[in-house]
Amino acid sequence: MLMKTHSQSLTEQLAARFGERIRDRLLAPGARLPSVRECARQQNVSPSTVVAAYDQLLAQGLVEARKNRGFFVREARAVRTEEVGAHDAHHASLSQGVHRASLSHGAHRASVSRDAPLASSSSLHRLAPRGASPPVNATALIRGMFHKISNKPQPGMGVFPADWMESTFMPAAVRKVTGTRALNEFSLQYGEPMGDSALRSALQKKLATLSVPASPEQIITTVGATHALDIVSRTMLRPGDPVMVEEPGWAVEFARLNALGMRLLPVPRRPDGPDLEVMERYCEQHKPKLYVSVSVFHNPTSYCLTPNSAHRVVQLANRHDFHIVEDDTYSHLAPVHAPRLASLDGLQRTIYVSGFAKILAPNWRIGFLAAPPELIEQLLDTKLLATLTTPALLERALAHCIEQGQLRRHAERIRTRLDQARSRSVKLATNAGCRFAAEPAGLFGWVDTGVDTDALAQRMLDEGYLLAPGALFHAERKPSTLMRINFATTQDAVFWKKYAETVRKM
């Protein structure tokens, strides 16, 4: 609630609130601001206050007025930081710096760590590659991780709450590998280009439990799973290359591939797997180089690939000569017997990617990829150009956690706690009027709210809650009544009460 103070008028406070959201990408370029009347009602101020606030945003170059349509957030390239005050310029330059980082080889350092009826396979409009502007406000979810919107649980977050991942074995593992001799070994020289040999050996054994055949020489460690995905893209693609992606899918992956200049070919994701008819037509018409998939506990639906669909995807890849990138970020939450493309394919056309941010320690930034032998040298070159090597000290500590069974026991505790949280969240969401568009499973729920979730997200932001609206999970933004919820952070009855009140008002 805005309250007039001696130091700041209501107009200044309202302008500052919108300005901060624009700079933090919580309001995306092209987003429409509420009408003057609607904003006045939402903020409990007079229409003249809203008009004055919008005038300030216009003067700062953050929004533009479109005749008979309202006020819209300006495209980032149109915002001139010299037009804003010193405080605003600082935030604007920070925002631009993050955007530039996402285009560089070091993008992984700033990266995370992981239906309404979908169009039928006969929908011809889905067969045209999309070169739409990237969903830049995908970064809002990342930014929300780095600086809190509020102290309330955040339904739109893609990670577990910090207290869920607290442990004593991780600090002990770090202490073990930081003895004087080990400290000299790890800290006073670069690590192995492929990654710590002990960790790669531990990962080989872990992959074997998933029936994924990979020798240590086929495994490269990375600075998180997103870095692994970036290495694959930069190695195997060139600007303009067509890439098949699942839709709905991971917003950050759409933005990353768009930033690299790729043409996105959205493949509808169904409960059993991708729409194979659409994939077949893409292969015939566009000859894609890659297909990026989350087979197990797909984000945002939590669907899992069925064996039949998995076999058909592998057959399609062999027939049309494309590679599969399997992002198994949520492997620690899934049963080992869940079908994985890398297992069926034997790492012939599949590149397997995973990491530990979701389950263990986000700030350790340890991920890895396992690939066919003939691709390893190319992938390693790309890694070396971006990071030289990866932090061997933390990699050796992680190897110790895996070898001692500590990671496995920790994951079992997390799964048990998540099952309980999911049960509670489903009840609260259902009682609040939500309908689950996908069977609840894994970390995420894909729910239908019955209202425009872009508008809902802005209203809930006023209450201190960051949502993940459905439009974020499409290769080309379009209105959606869906949103993704995190079962671990939506057990708060206060949130669901506020959600239900907001939806009723809409």
Image (cartoon, rainbow, N blue to C red):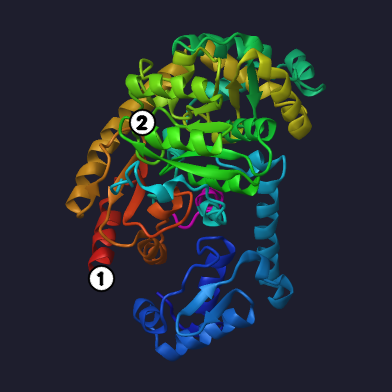
- Residues 156 and 299: in front is 299
Instruction: Specify the farthest residue to the bottom.
Output: 48
Q: Residue at x 32, y 42 (%)?
A: 445
Q: Is residue 54 left or right of residue 484?
A: right
Q: Amino acid at mark 1?
A: Lys
Name the quarter where the C terminus is drawn.
bottom left
Counting from the top left corner in percent of width and height, residue 58 is at 59, 81
Q: Amino acid at mark 2?
A: Gly
- Residues 55 and 306: in front is 306
Label 1 neighbour load within 10 Å: few <14, some 14-19, many 20+: few
Residue 123 visible? The answer is yes
Q: Is residue 120 left or right of residue 2?
A: left
Q: Is residue 251 above or below residue 329?
A: below
- Residues 20 and 276: in front is 276
Residue denoted by label 1: 505
Counting from the top left corner in percent of width and height, residue 232 is at 63, 30
Q: Is residue 106 left or right of residue 225?
A: right
**Tag 1 secondary structure:** helix
Spatial distance from mark 2 to mark 1, Cα to Cα? 37 Å
Report if residue 266 lies within the magenta region.
no
Instruction: Specify the farthest residue to the front.
Output: 284
User: Which of the marked residues, 2 or 1, is nearer the chain's N terminus?
Assistant: 2
Label 2 neighbour load within 10 Å: few <14, some 14-19, many 20+: many
**Tag 2 secondary structure:** strand
Kindly indicate whether the residue at mark 1 contacts the one at mark 2 (C-beta within 8 angstroms): no
Q: Residue at x 73, y 15 (%)?
A: 182
Q: Is residue 426 above or below residue 458?
A: above
Residue denoted by label 2: 273
Residue 355 visible? The answer is no
Magenta region, residue range: 141-151
